[in-house]
Image (cartoon, coloured by chain):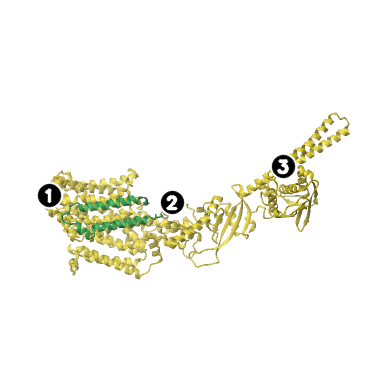
Amino acid sequence: MARQPDSDQQKEHTLLLSLFALFLFASPFTVWWASDHQPWFLPYLLWLLIILLCFWLSIRYRHHDL
Amino acid sequence: MTYELEVLFGASLLYLLVLFLVAYVTDSGLIPEKWTSNSFVYVLSLGVYATSWSYYGSVGFADQEGFQFLTIYLGVTIAFLLTPLLLQPILRMTRDYQFSSLADLFAFRFRSQLAGALVTLFMLVGSLPYIALQIRAVTSSLRVLTQEVTPQFLALGFCIMLILFAIMFGARHISPREKHTGLVAAIAFESLIKLAALLLVGLFAVFEVFSGPVELSRWLTSHPEATEALYQPMREGPWITLLFLSFCAAFLLPRQFHMIFAENRSFRSLGTASWAFPLFLLLLNLAIPPILWAGNHLGLEMDADYYVLGITLVKGPEWLPVLAFIGGVSAASAMVIVTTLALSSMSLNHLLLPASYPDPKVDLYRWLLWGRRLLICIIIMAGFGFYELLEHNQGLVQMGLISFVAVAQFLPGIIGVLYWPRATRLGFIAGLLGGIAVWSVSLLLPLLEQSGFMESGIDLQNLHQSSGLGQWPFATFWSLACNGLLFVAVSLLTRQSAEEREAALACHSDSTLSTPLEGVVTATSPHQFEEGLAQIVGRETAEMEVTQALHDLGMSADESRPRELRHLREQIERNLSGLIGPQMAHMIINRRLGMDSQAKIALADSIRHMEERLEESRSRLQGVSADLDTLRRYHRQILLDLPLGVCAVTPDHRVVLWNLALEVMSGVSANQAVGRKLSALPQPWAQLLAGFALAQDEHIPHMEIQVDERPRWYNLHKATIPEPDLTQPKDSSRTGLVMLLEDLTDLENLEAELAHSDRLATIGRLAAGVAHEIGNPVTGIASLAQNLREEQDPVIIEESIEAILEQTRRISSIVQGLMNFSRSGSGSAGTDYQTFALKEIVEDAIRLVQLTRKGRQVECSNRCPPHLQLVGNRQRLSQVLLNLLTNACDASRPGDEVEIFAFEKQNQIQLEVMDQGQGIPEQVQESIFEPFFTTKKPGEGTGLGLSLVHKIIQEHNGQIDVDSVSGVGTRVVIRLPSQAPPSDAAPHTPGDHL
């Protein structure tokens, strides 16, 4: 199964997205937005954002599926 | 509200039966394949991740640790985000080598039975708390609903039910290798039930306990401590540790590995799962905060773990608590069934089979099936035992997290498999043992101690406090640090075996080329494979396995090429590995289907292997390698595109290269030819090429062979080439051959056509003369006949009749000569060699030429001795003479003489045609034999005559020379061998040269 040259690009974008997710959920930034006065559904919204970005990436690289 | 025990037990049983029905219907194909292999079914089946810990325990976790409960799912999200980097490479490996578990993967990669056994044991021990947790959740939820203490045997009853269903789901068929589509469908259904139940309870909480979202937000505003309680632990608790642990658990837990990889049916599903599964988890957890707040609002006095049931008991319809309960049972049973199936197959392959391999007389498949069933019982009962031992006031969360830390110990190993080919078996084992040790001391022993199961002198429970870390960060950090350090250090200090290196490259996701195949298979047919295997797995199993492998590869049962047999061997190993695990399969194959590592690999195999690997990894080559590869392709393309057929063979006459032109010429494809010996090719190529390869001559022009009953001609050339031995240093005593085939058939046919056209053209030119020549005798006959009508004198009658007959003879000879001349020369005329008198054909030629005007004006003298004989093609030699005489006459003036001499000289016959014509200028003399070269005006000649003459003389192995002086005359000298037929132009078989 020959890999296309821009599967490297897919990997890079995936890595970027993961780092973004970590930034949102596992960095000092997390402490910042997790303050007491935020609405209770904020974590869910951010989670949904990550999922949507992942969905977008998977649509974009769909032709790589074997 | 309370419920009767029997009702609830009955409901659970009913539910499990429905689940089984879903599986059964799917397996038997009643549901269309399109639905069951849908990506979303796959995604839902991954929902087995959410067990009763998620279902009940999340609310308890949220109550105590706020939003920390989300980490269990956020970590999974991050793991699935990394699908292309993490999950897809593992899936590729799993499919390529038919792994059914993580233990298979590690055993394959590190080529170590110990590694596989260790992983299995650790997985077993690590999973027991988790299984016990499920049993506890079910019994506790029963207690909440019945308000009674559950009798002891109920837990046991639940376990027995689970054993039965696990066997029915996963150990029903004789051949345990088939994918369990039924199981996947059932688990997907179960995930839906879970999701629906939880969302319903959530909606109930929002709309019934609170009277709607508006009221809920009002309640939240008036109780700010509610949201505060959610957020605060995020900032202070072991947030990152938990994220990390759930990241590992997402794909390393036995049930997760099984559903994500072993039961996967397409890469596309995994791609969909990368976003769809986190979405499922998000929806599942949406209901948790409302349920928690509803519980708090109602002031429930129970473990927050069971608020899901609690709030439905206070208000609401009677069926809701039952539904909620079923959701919990669903979650628990799915986890136990899938985990047990995964663990049982692991234990079978890595613990049971290596320990007590069955007698070959026993049916292997049956043995495997019953072994599996036994292991399922043992595992679930062990989980029950663990449940019994534990103190009942352990939180659900604690027991789950212990398993998480346990499976996290495999993360260094997985990263090593994917990205560090240098990792060694000893390093892996050392790291694993180190991690296990720290895990046991920091987590398992405290748990056992807490339950009063054992006593140790150390204050284990507070070990972590001295470091300032919480219990989980402490355990996670130290176990993984120990694991990782030992893994790296010991790997660097030890060396890999050759087998390990091969496996490492196979697994390494960035490998560009795997090692060239070493050694040659000793077997020479698939049947021999069967014989070899039968001694270990029994005759029937061996036959089935070999047949299956042949079928998988689309190979025929009488394959004999070494390279294909090696593929077969690999496929058999792969299939067996899906059955009994990679380590056992590898051992059996190595022992029984041996390879001769001393034998030099056939060059044909190496080249094809190398080319295939280069094709696969083309996009991954960079720098010099990429340039070299491009250059290689360019050269190969030149060879392939040559209009000549090219065939290269090894010293033992196996085909290495068979280009496109040769494919077209012979109708034998490269696939069929490469790897075979020349003598094994289809006829007539086998005889042609094998014979030529052995012949002394390096060139054989004009070889005629019969292909499909038609004659074809080829020029054959060959040259020796030193063999590039890819595995050993230069050994110049071995040389291969490259053979070139030039197809002359079309050329031959064209030349025959040309010769024929030339003849016809000549006849055309003669036509006028013919008409005249026939006309005269006919007139003569007419007048004689008229006279005869009135003649009475018998003597004159006699004379007249004679004269008429003489005239008819004259006409006949002209007509016969023309007919002889014009007869079409097909290729096979080349075989018509006769012996005839030279003088005769000269006479024929003179007679014909005198039909032309020029011919009549010139006197042609035949001075050939009557005894001289020629052997050759009479017709073509006549054509030669006619052409020469025509030219001589055309060049002469009226009244000149053209003489034809012949004599024998040194085994040759020399024929000379001399004229006194204008001669041929010197600058033109070199070109006269070129086709289409003429000094005549257009329309007067085609320019083909002399070139044909030249060709015909060459065919007869003769020579032709022209001696000419301008203004004086021209002498054409032809020398032909006198006796034997010309050897090279005659058709012969390759056998003549041996």
Are marks 2 and 3 in one subunit? yes
For mark 1, what is the residue? B219
On screen, A18 above or below B320? below
Whole-percent x, y for residue B516 in the image? 45, 62
Q: CA distance from mark 3 to mark 1?
A: 120 Å
Which element type, helix, strand or loop, lies under badge 3? helix
Name the image quarter holding the C terminus of chain B.
bottom right
Q: State the residue position of label 2.
A: B551
Question: SS at mark 2?
Answer: helix
* Amino acid at pointer 3: Arg
CB of mark 2 within 8 Å of CB of mark 3?
no
Label 2, label 3: how far apart the Cα atoms are:
70 Å
**Drawn colour of chain A?**
green
Q: Earlier in the sequence, mark 2 or mark 3?
A: 2
Residue A24, image x and y in percent?
Answer: 24, 57
Q: Is residue B290 left or right of residue B405?
A: left
Crowd around label 1: few <14 · some 14–19 · many ≥20 (10 Å): some
Q: Do the residues indicated by labels 3 and 1 lie within the same chain of the protein?
A: yes
Residue B765 - label: 3
